[in-house]
Image (cartoon, rainbow, N blue to C red):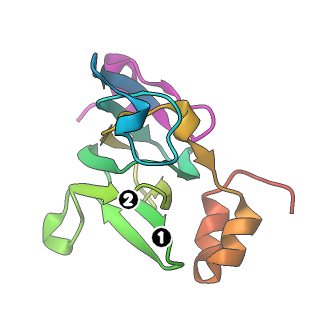
């Protein structure tokens, strides 16, 4: 199996600054959805769909964030990933995305729009290569970074995991 570095070079993955991890956009539809065709809360048009490759390594994590639309994760290669999803109704769940479907790992997982999400490589893992697709497509205006104190107050049962999935922030 190739190393994380080799895959980063082959796929031209670059650091994802605010969220963390490495990514490259692989698809952006040439077709757009007009604002009046989108659910409330969107401003401006959006591409019909977008797709990326996304990699986590032991020294990276996907910081807690939320998006307006649903995001479908696809597992491709490597080790398992622990994902925290905090739902609008105040509940949350941890999901394991990875290759061992027999033990309950998921090859795909949909994070509903408006849910908070963050993920990290499972302990001992070397890397995980995943992909995500969105429809309507991703736009940076739809990204909201999660704040540790606010999320921990709203979801106290997940405060320890939230702390590992948020960059160092003033308390």
Extreme residue in the left direction: 102
Does 30 sit left or right of 142 as displayed? left
Does 56 sit left or right of 1 as displayed? right
Does 31 sit left or right of 34 as displayed? left
* The C terminus lies in quadrant: bottom right
Q: Secondary structure at mark 1?
A: loop
Q: Can you identify the residue that label 2 sits on?
A: 112
Extreme residue in the front direction: 36
Q: Percent position (x, y) of residue 6?
A: 35, 24
- Can the viewer see residue 5? no
Q: Percent position (x, y) of residue 43?
A: 53, 35
Q: Percent position (x, y) of residue 54?
A: 39, 37
Q: Quadrant of residue 47?
A: top left
- Can the viewer see residue 66? yes
Mark 2: few/some/many CA within 10 Å (<14, 14-19, 20+): some
The residue sitting at 32% across, 30% down in the picture is 50
Which of the two discs, 2 and 1, labels the residue nearer the N terminus?
Answer: 1
* The N terminus lies in quadrant: top left
Q: Can you identify the residue that label 1 sits on?
A: 87
Q: Percent position (x, y) of residue 120?
A: 48, 55
The answer to the question of whether label 2 and label 1 lie on touching residues, with beta carbons closer than 8 A, is yes
The residue sitting at 48% across, 56% down in the picture is 119
The residue sitting at 38% across, 28% down in the picture is 34
Q: State the count of labels.
A: 2
Foreground: 124 or 107?
Answer: 107
10 w.r.t. 163: above or below = above
Q: Is residue 170 magenta?
A: no
Extreme residue in the bottom direction: 157
Q: Is residue 13 magenta?
A: yes
The residue sitting at 72% across, 76% down in the picture is 153
Q: Secondary structure at mark 2?
A: loop
Residue range in magenta is: 1-22
């Amino acid at each position: 199996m190739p190393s994380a570095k080799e895959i980063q070079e082959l796929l031209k993955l670059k650091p994802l600054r605010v969220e963390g991890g490495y990514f490259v956009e692989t698809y952006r539809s040439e077709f757009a959805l007009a604002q009046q065709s989108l659910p409330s809360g969107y401003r401006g048009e959006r591409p019909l769909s977008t797709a990326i490759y996304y990699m986590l390594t032991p020294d990276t994590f996907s910081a807690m964030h939320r998006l307006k639309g649903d995001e479908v994760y696809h597992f491709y290669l490597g080790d398992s990933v622990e994902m925290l999803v905090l739902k609008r109704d105040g509940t949350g769940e941890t999901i394991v995305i990875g290759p061992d479907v027999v033990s309950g790992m998921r090859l795909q997982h949909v994070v509903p729009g408006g849910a908070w999400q963050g993920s990290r490589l499972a302990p001992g893992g070397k890397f995980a290569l995943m992909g995500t697709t969105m429809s309507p497509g991703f736009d940076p205006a739809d990204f909201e970074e999660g704040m540790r104190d606010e999320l921990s107050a709203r979801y106290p049962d997940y405060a320890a995991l939230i702390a590992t999935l948020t960059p160092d922030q003033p308390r």
